[in-house]
Image (cartoon, rainbow, N blue to C red):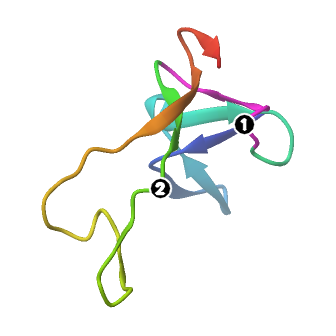
Amino acid sequence: MSVHFDCALQVDYEGKDHTLIRDEDILLVYNGDELTLAECEPAWDRIIVKVASSSEATSSGIVVAPTSGGEAKASEGEVRFCTLCGAF
């Protein structure tokens, strides 16, 4: 079993590097060597969302990322997995 986490603290324990994480920082749990939608499950009460593309281009063709400032815009996506309902 493998996990994907948000925050971590690097610690030295008995001369070896380790990663210390809190249980609430675990985002996904999965089996196997590679993280795939078929093998992963969100931890806690979380959902997996496939986010729709929302970049914009200026008249000169420069792509503006949604997080680059300006007015906040709503994001859209498709729910792919929910810990309360199961896979979609």
Percent across and percent down for residue 29 are 67, 32
In the rendered structure, are the residues bearing label 2 and label 1 in contact, judged by CB atoms less than 8 Å apart? no
Residue under pointer 2:
53
Packing grade of label 2 (10 A; few <14, some 14-19, many >=20) is few
Residue located 67% across and 63% down the image = 15
Compared with 59, 31 (above or below) is: above
Q: Identify the image quadrant of the C terminus.
A: top right
Numbered badge on residue 1 = none
Q: Which residues are magenta?
A: 36-44
Q: What kind of residue is marked 2? A: Ser
The residues tagged by marks 2 and 1 sit, at their Cα atoms, a distance apart of 19 Å
Asked whether residue 37 is drawn in magenta, I would say yes
Percent across and percent down for residue 78 are 52, 33
Give the farthest residue toward the left.
Answer: 71
Compared with 42, 5 (above or below) is: below
Compared with 75, 13 (above or below) is: below
Give the farthest residue toward the front.
Answer: 59
Numbered badge on residue 37 = 1
Q: Identify the image quadrant of the N terminus.
A: top right
The majority secondary structure of the magenta stretch comes to loop
Q: What kind of residue is marked 1? A: Leu
